[in-house]
Amino acid sequence: MSEVTRKYEGNAAVLTLSNEGKLNALTTGMLRQLEAYLTEIEHQNEVRCVILTGAGEKAFCCGADIAEWGGLSPAEFARFWVRDGHRVFDRLARFSKPTIGALNGHAFGGGLELAACCDLRVLSAKARLALPEAKIGIVPGWSGTQRLARLLPEPVVKEMALFGHQITAERALQLGFVAELSDDPSSSAYDIAGSLGAVSPRATELAKAMIHGAVGEDRAAAIEVLGSAAAAASADRDEGVQAFLEKRSPKFDGQ
């Protein structure tokens, strides 16, 4: 049985972490499935956004499955588990379409780091957020001290990572980490996704790249995306391609 399921709802692709027996803890297989779905969806023009949620009502994701990484050597843990997770999380964070995290329950450890990769988050009013890694002798490894530190005040990240404190849903809203609290985060996420029908897909994609450039999320790629988009829309580009195909020198006019 797939531990990440996909369905389409309106203009959104809905990805659900379906490891409910372990509070949707992330496994190697789940990371691979998530990455594969994102790659596939990015090329589907009819899909305007991705909604990421978890199965059940208790947890969006309680982190990484300890049974998966607990027996790894230090080198394997760092080189494969942490790096592979980073690659998948970066894939989500730098996805060209808008992403919405429908946090149906608690988001702890890797689950909170995964939620931080989404553009917008809707949180269950009963849920809590936490970085409990220090309680088992490790540290956040999937951007909890990096990306999350750009989204929350430094003292709050330290409160969670150093002291193990949990953040309530209400406090997460006050801090601006979530857009709204909801008794039905998935339904709220569908409503938000529906609003994308009134805006330009291209403008949305470019605006996201510009914002990412400003905050340092894959800044180099964001700059090149914007520059490439401008170049690709030029008459010079059309002339250059045509000249190459016709095996002649191009006649650029700067348009």
Image (tube, rainbow, N blue to C red):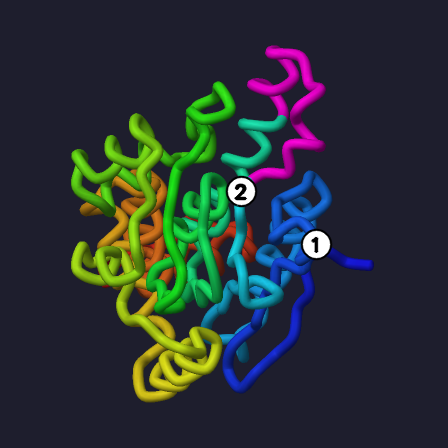
**Amino acid under label 2?**
Gly
Q: State yes or no: residue 77 in magenta.
A: yes
Q: Position of residue 35 (x, y in %)?
A: 61, 49
Start and end of the magenta stretch? 64-80
Q: Position of residue 33 (x, y in %)?
A: 69, 52
Q: Residue at x 28, y 45 (%)?
A: 223
Instruction: Identify the residue position indicated by label 1 in the image.
Output: 21
Q: Is residue 153 above or below residue 105?
A: above
Q: Residue at x 46, y 55 (%)?
A: 106
**Amino acid under label 1?**
Gly
Q: Residue at x 47, y 61 (%)?
A: 105
Q: Position of residue 162 (x, y in %)?
A: 30, 26
Instruction: Identify the residue position indicated by label 2 in the image.
Output: 63
| Secondary structure of residue under mark 2 | loop
Q: Is residue 137 above or below residue 164?
A: above
Label 1 and label 2: CA atoms lie apart by 13 Å
Q: Position of residue 184 (x, y in %)?
A: 44, 78
Image quadrant where residue 208 sits:
bottom left
